[in-house]
Amino acid sequence: MYRIGLGYDIHTLVSGRDLIIGGVKITHEKGLMGHSDADVLIHAIIDALLGALSLNDIGTLFPDTDKKFKDADSTLLLKSVYEKINAKGYGIVNIDSNIIAQEPKMMPYIPKMREALDNILEIGQSNISIKAKTNEKMDAVGQKLAIEAHAVVLLKRIEA
């Protein structure tokens, strides 16, 4: 049996924070505002995984009202969610994702992001697609005020 999940996240760019996307620290004068490290790509992937099995969403599982998630490393949150997916008897077939940012340019960081995600999920980098897009200077992303990400995952029941 297969299950598909869709995830989305957006965070505001602010001064005084590191920019971490896909588990990779990116050189930029601003970072993303959030309760955790605000990794939009990993958050979108987490929501896609949770959605595929109807397990609520990232905000329910890791609420921003809980101090233990303050400045949390999103790679650890992803690992926790992936363990839940495996415990339900599912594995990831593949991930397809987009990072939408006017700047900085994401392409130089994508190989490291794919490696970082594969280190957690162990599905092979060839099963992790990350594409970089801009919003052509339109809306909050295009005006360099925010970065967003979308992700789709395909899960397959693991044969016992």
Image (tube, grey):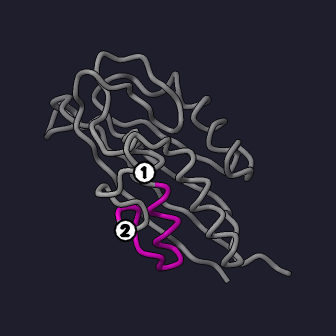
Dot 2 alpha-carbon crowd within 10 angstroms: few under 14, some 14 to 19, many 20 or more: few
Quadrant of the image occupied by residue 3: bottom right
Looking at marks 1 and 2 on the same chain, the residue that comes earlier in the sequence is marked by 2
From this view, report whether residue 54 is shown above or below residue 78.
below
Asked whether, in this view, residue 27 is left or right of residue 100, the answer is: right
Mark 1 and mark 2 residues within 8 Å of each other at the beta carbon: no
**Position of residue 78 measured from the top left corner of the image (x, y, whole percent):** 55, 53
Give the prevailing secondary structure in the magenta stretch: helix
Q: Quadrant of the C terminus?
A: bottom right
Is-magenta flag for residue 157? no
Which mark, residue 68?
A: 1
Dot 1 alpha-carbon crowd within 10 angstroms: few under 14, some 14 to 19, many 20 or more: few
Q: Which residue is mark 2?
A: 60
**Position of residue 34 measured from the top left corner of the image (x, y, whole percent):** 30, 42
Where disc 1 sits, the SS reads helix
In the foreground, 10 or 62: 62
Say which residue appears at 15% left-offset and 37% top-offset.
Answer: 138
Which region shows up in magenta?
45-59
